[in-house]
Image (cartoon, grey):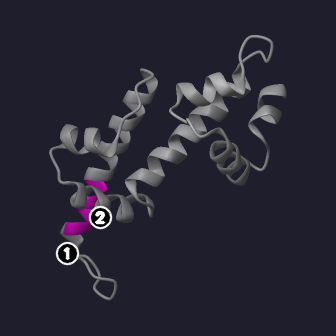
Amino acid sequence: VPQDDVMPSYRERLRALYIGGKARAFVDACLDEDALPTVVDICAALGVSERTLQYSFREYVGMSPTAYLRMRRLNCVRTTLAAEDPRQITVTQVAMRFGFLHLGRFSGDYKRLFGETPSETLGS
């Protein structure tokens, strides 16, 4: 278990990068099929504990698996909104499709990440 003042060994870093890469590929594959993976899903697919996944993600992308999943889903929303006709779809429909049920929080997170509101992305 790495501590704040102890650097992980080369082997531990390699394992973290391997697990992180596998997890990323799993998440991408799920999202490509309109499935919303959870941390539990990732752990089951990779055969690792949640704690191992946490450490691996911290090393691989510098954030927790939950934060990574949220960021990936926000990026999926942005990609979808940018590609859609605003007369054919709503921000709410896209947000719900990617598992955002609290629309106020979603909108705030979206604006912080992209510097514009979801409706601005859809309208552009």
Q: Which amino acid type corresponds to the residue marked 1 in the rendered image?
A: Val
Give the numbered dot on residue 1: 1
Residue 28 or residue 64, whichever sits in front = 64
Q: Residue at x 17, y 50 (%)?
A: 48
User: Most extreme residue toward the bottom, as rendered?
Assistant: 5
- x, y percent for residue 64: 40, 59
Query: Is 46 situated above or below 4?
Result: above
Chain part drawn in magenta: 12-18
Query: Is 98 situated above or below 72?
Result: above
- x, y percent for residue 104: 68, 44
- x, y percent for residue 100: 55, 36
Q: Secondary structure at mark 1?
A: loop
In the image, is residue 11 part of the stretch drawn in magenta?
Answer: no
Classify mark 1: residues with Cα within 10 Å, few (<14), some (14-19) or many (20+): few
Q: Which residue is mark 2?
A: 55
Question: In the image, is 90 to the left or to the right of 69?
Answer: right
Q: Residue at x 38, y 37 (%)?
A: 27
Q: Which amino acid type corresponds to the residue marked 2 in the rendered image?
A: Tyr
- x, y percent for residue 69: 45, 45
Residue 59 or residue 9, whichever sits in front = 59
Question: In the image, is 115 to the left or to the right of 3?
Answer: right
Q: CA distance from mark 2 to mark 1?
A: 8 Å
Classify mark 2: residues with Cα within 10 Å, few (<14), some (14-19) or many (20+): many
In the image, is residue 14 part of the stretch drawn in magenta?
Answer: yes
Q: Residue at x 44, y 64 (%)?
A: 62
Query: Is 85 situated above or below 29?
Result: above
> Is label 2 in contact with label 1 (beta carbons under 8 Å)?
yes
Residue 95 or residue 22, whichever sits in front = 95
User: Most extreme residue toward the left, as rendered?
Assistant: 47
